[in-house]
Image (spheres, helix red, strand yellow):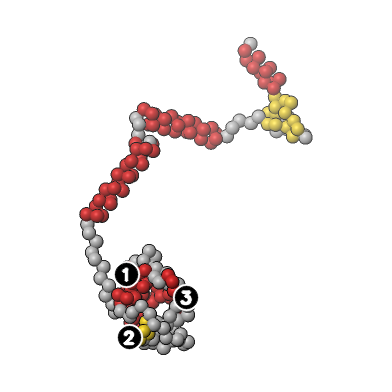
Amino acid sequence: MASENIKQQNNEDYEIDTLTNDRLIKDHEYDGIRELDNDLPPWWKWLFYITIVFAAVYLIRLFVFHSDDLIQDREFAKEMKNVAAAKTAESATPAAEFKVELLTDEASLAAGQETWTKICAACHLADGGGLVGPNMTDDYWIHGNTVNDLFNVVSNGVIEKGMLPYKNQLSEQKRLEVVSYILEKLHGSTPANPKAPQGKKY
């Protein structure tokens, strides 16, 4: 009797398409389009079940076992502790003092030329003849001509003359390489269109 009632109820709610055997919901039609009542695909159902299981495991770990990796305050405190330990270890090992000495090996000069071409040539030209910046090939220097003088200019810049500081953009080694390239390769060379001398002759 119960089986007959269910069948009758289904018959009241659905119609069967005689061509495709699809179940059509009654009274669900708009502009000639009928609504089907197909079962959900198995993969969708399993995905839904998996999300339920995942949520249950997550909630148990969070509220029952209080897992550290799920509680943001604890995770943040742990990361800050790691950062503090790293800083302590870094400060405990003093860095070797960087020596500003002229480099003459070809590898360093080649690296200096690469930095010069990428950054410095825009204002001083690739051959060092000078454009916005001064000529780097003659014997006239505005801020001195020693390796320390040039290293200081590259590091701290000369803002009033448009020279930007590069201490935060280039490492000490990169700055020393480009300064060495200027003194070893560009100074004394013959640029195509040298800019007029500026500064004091050394």
Q: Position of residue 162 (x, y in %)?
A: 45, 72
Q: Are marks 2 and 3 in contact (CB under 8 Å)?
A: no
Q: Secondary structure at mark 3?
A: helix
Amino acid beneath label 1? Gln
Q: Position of residue 81 (x, y in %)?
A: 30, 44
49 versus 167 height, above or below: above
Q: Position of residue 157 (x, y in %)?
A: 39, 70
Give the residue drawn at x 77%, y 35%: 31
Q: Are marks 3 and 1 in contact (CB under 8 Å)?
A: no
101 versus 11 height, above or below: below
130 versus 97 height, above or below: below
Q: Earlier in the sequence, mark 3 or mark 1?
A: 3
Crowd band around label 3 with a 10 angstrom C-alpha radius: few (<14), some (14–19), many (20+): some
Residue 127 appears in the rendering: no
Report the Cα–Cα distance between label 2 and label 1: 26 Å
Q: Quadrant of residue 188?
A: bottom left
Q: Position of residue 114 (x, y in %)?
A: 40, 74
Give the residue drawn at x 42%, y 70%: 159
Amino acid beneath label 2? Tyr
Q: Secondary structure at mark 2?
A: loop
> Which residue is label 3 attached to?
122
Report the Cα–Cα distance between label 2 and label 3: 25 Å
Q: Earlier in the sequence, mark 2 or mark 3?
A: 3
**Left or right of 19 on screen, residue 133:** left
Amino acid beneath label 3? Ala
> Which residue is label 2 attached to?
202
